[in-house]
Amino acid sequence: MDLKLKNKVAIVTGSSKGIGAGIAKAFASAGAKVVVNYASSKEDAEKVVSKITENGGTAIAIYSDVTKSEDVKRLFEETKNAFGQLDILVNNAGIYKFEPLEGVTEDSFHSQYNTHVLGTILSTQQAVKLFGDKGGSVINISSTVSQNPVAGLTIYASAKAAIDNLTKLLAKELGDRKIRVNAIAPGITETEGTRSGGIIGSDMEKQMVAMTPLGRTGQPDDIAKVAVFLASDDAGWVTGERISVAGGLL
């Protein structure tokens, strides 16, 4: 087994299910101690932790709403208390809502922007403090819609575009502190969210798969493998990048 992340500690926000859960499990398999963060699904988070520990890994679940600064501070304090350090942050927590322009409300705007953009900023602020002089790796989860938006995703697609910009900006700002910042942009991926949202099995999925050169829907593990690379020392000379992990979907 290639333990690329041995002796490292990682926080993965929004990792009770979906892509975040896949990344948390892959990090643990690569040797990292993992904090499985959740905001609403304690049971699902504990299932991820149980899966990791059953396979010989180390993980704990910590509640935190990434849109609230006090919650975020506590998340990082509890991580320090449990593991004494932090080496990797994955800003994965996210929500989306399909709605036409006429349907956009202040609530839908703030809920999505606060989760994706403010949550990424608040979490990265705390990570920088805990990384210390040794530096670390921040991985932001973007989306193919940040550059090729889908109608009806006005707020989500623009929030993900902001994540792309933040990734480049923070890579420049934090580089002298030995902190690397990169983004992963998944294409259509089969998760609890895309299943419950009616995307998997729909005409939209068929259309997106038809536009995907590798001809299938992605799985969380497809994303997780690239996250392991970006978190590891193998990516020591990689920062400010947005890597599409989408089977060729642009």
Image (tube, rainbow, N blue to C red):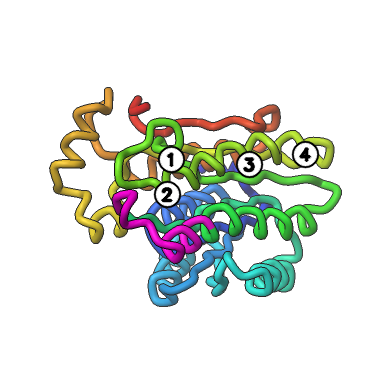
Magenta segment's dominant SS is helix
Q: Residue at x 78, y 45 (%)?
A: 135
Q: Which stretch appears magenta? A: 98-113
Label 3 neighbourhood size at 10 Å, few (<14), some (14-19), many (20+)?
A: many
Query: What kind of residue is marked 1?
Result: Ser
Alpha carbon separation for disc pair 2 and 3: 15 Å
| SS assignment at label 1 | loop
Is the residue under label 1 in contact with that under label 2 (CB below 8 Å)?
Answer: yes
Name the N-terminal-most of marks 4 and 3.
3
Q: Position of residue 49 (x, y in %)?
A: 47, 68
Relative image position of residue 13 (x, y in whole percent): 54, 60
Q: Are marks 1 and 4 in contact (CB under 8 Å)?
A: no
Determine which of the numbered discs, if any, sits on residue 143 in the image: 1
Sequence-wise, the earlier of marks 2 and 4 is 2
Q: Label 2, on which residue? A: 156
Mark 2 and mark 3 in contact? Answer it, CB < 8 Å.
no
Mark drawn on residue 166: 3
Amino acid carrying label 4: it is Glu
Amino acid under label 3? Answer: Leu
Residue 173: numbered disc: 4
How far is the residue under mark 1 from the one under mark 4?
23 Å
Using the image, determine if residue 140 lies above or below residue 103.
above
The local crowd at label 4, few if under 14, some if 14 to 19, many if 20 or more residues have their Cα within 10 Å, is: few
